[in-house]
Amino acid sequence: MIDQILEMEKGKRIRAHKSVTVNEFYLAGHFPDVPIVPGVMTLEGMLQCALILVNEFYSRGKVTSTLEKVDRLKFKRPVVPGDQLEFQVQLTAQAAHAFKFKGKALVGKETAAEADFILKISIREVGFEL
């Protein structure tokens, strides 16, 4: 869901970009006459940004995650083909392997979606992978 990372402050926040095109696989059949990006895909973009941010905490090992909780998820505007979607995610708290985030998806200056969520991270230490 991310085309480009625009800005990242290690361990704190990230901004990323997604150009929504009519060819996105998840638009097929999702309101055929008026394609709208499913809300879960907008949330997925925020989660991917959070994982990129978390990955910066670990210099070694394979990072895996589980979505533990989503709070205050609000969809405020539909996202349609042609929109330039910007994801803004910031780390708000960390305890052991639980990371709490505040995420927002914007189209221009208009908020399309926002959510608070918690990811539980596990690390598998590896020397190298084949």
Image (cartoon, rainbow, N blue to C red):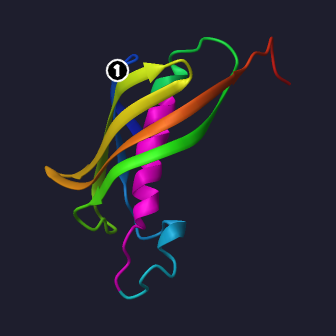
Image height of 32 relative to 110, above or below? below
Image-quadrant location for residue 34: bottom left
Left or right, residue 85 beside residue 43: left
Question: Magenta segment, principal secondary structure?
Answer: helix
Instruction: Compare residues 70 and 62 and report the one nearer the observer.
Output: 70
Q: Amino acid at mark 1?
A: Lys
Given the current orientation, which residue lies at the most extreme bottom position? 33
Q: Residue 107's spot in the image, x, y percent?
A: 22, 54
Instruction: Compare residues 82 and 57 and report the one nearer the observer.
Output: 57
Q: Which residues are magenta?
A: 34-52
Tag count: 1
Image height of 95 relative to 85, above or below? above
Q: In which quadrant will I find the C terminus?
A: top right
* Viewer can see residue 119: yes
Image-quadrant location for residue 76: bottom left
Density class for disc 1 (Cα within 10 Å; few <14, some 14-19, many ≥20) is some
Image height of 23 relative to 28, above or below? above
Q: Secondary structure at mark 1?
A: loop
Left or right, residue 25 beside residue 6: right
Image height of 8 relative to 119, above or below? above
Image-quadrant location for residue 127: top right
Q: Residue 67's spot in the image, x, y percent?
A: 55, 43
Residue 42 on the magenta span: yes
Instruction: Compare residues 109 and 58 and report the one nearer the observer.
Output: 58
Left or right, residue 90 beside residue 24: left
Q: Residue 94's spot in the image, x, y percent?
A: 44, 21
Q: Residue 111's spot in the image, x, y percent?
A: 20, 53
Q: Which residue is mark 1?
A: 12
Query: Residue at the location (50% across, 18% down)?
Result: 56
Residue 1 on the magenta span: no
Query: Residue at the location (24% across, 50% down)?
Result: 106
